[in-house]
Image (cartoon, rainbow, N blue to C red):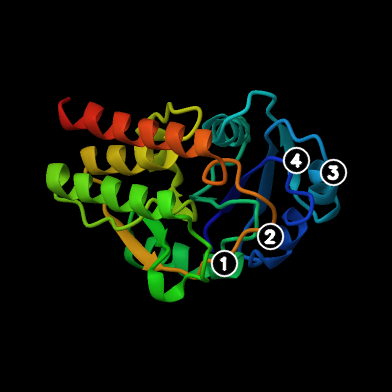
Amino acid sequence: MPNIKVIIPAFNEQDSIGLVIKAIPEIANEIIVVSNNSTDQTEQVALDAGATVLKEARKGYGYACLKGMAYIANQNETPDIIVFLDGDYSDYPEEMSKIVQPIIEEDIDFVVGARVKALREKGSMTLPQIFGNWLATTLMRLFFKSTFTDLGPFRAIKYQRLMDLKMEDKTYGWTVEMQLKALKQRLTYREIPVRYRNRIGESKVSGTVKGAIFAGVKILGWIFKYSFK
């Protein structure tokens, strides 16, 4: 079996993080929760559930992901696959097995869990999220002939391919940056339909007007940057 590490950015997810960790299949070699300046019991709940807990004081989804990657880079053993998912229990962690399957069995480089409408719980994605996904993936299709339909956070990638992407974004643009760089570097990729439910607690991005606007600006910024590069 491949060595699989899971990175979960988490900001004040004490009510959900334990559920997320316990639902992850046993094929994961290590679960890394990056507390993104949490002020509640997220860190203790994650520790009690068996995760490795890191602290990242700088707020931002990308900051948390980069913290997890830096930790892995300093380990003696290099992993084969990195899985990213959210800590709010909106993803179904037990579906991780089918997210990594194309990498293990077909040598695909990168897999995104697509939150297709038929599998989404009502209200689990806000209108700004739905529109943002449509706009971003439409632009990627126009500029890069991409087949992506979603910017879903539940994703898996070969470790070396991830390192080759040289990820930079510190906040809202992390997911689209990864997909754009995967396209530019001609990685093989696939989308796997996944279920999606209403998160536990309020979203720190789509749940606020400010977050939705900043996320939209970041996503469009990355797309146009790479379209004319």
Q: Amino acid at mark 4?
A: Val
Q: State which quadrant residue 103 falls in.
A: bottom left
Which is in the foreground here, disc 3 or disc 1?
A: 1
Across and down, in percent, residue 190 comes to 31, 60
Task: Tell me how far mark 3 sits from mark 1, CA to CA.
Answer: 23 Å
Whether tag 3 and tag 2 are in contact, CB under 8 A, the answer is no
Task: Tell me how far mark 3 sits from mark 2, CA to CA.
Answer: 15 Å
Task: Tell me how far mark 2 sits from mark 4, CA to CA.
Answer: 14 Å
Relative depth, front residue between 95 and 61: 61
Quadrant location, the N terminus: bottom right
Task: Tell me how far mark 4 sits from mark 3, CA to CA.
Answer: 12 Å
Q: Which mark is residue 20?
A: 2
Helix, strand or loop at disc 4?
A: strand
Which is in the foreground here, disc 2 or disc 4?
A: 2
At x 63%, y 32%, the residue is: 71
Dot placed on the residue nearer the N-terminal end, 2 or 4: 2
Dot placed on the residue nearer the N-terminal end, 4 or 1: 4
The residue that label 1 is drawn on is 197
At x 39%, y 57%, the residue is: 112
Q: Amino acid at mark 2?
A: Val
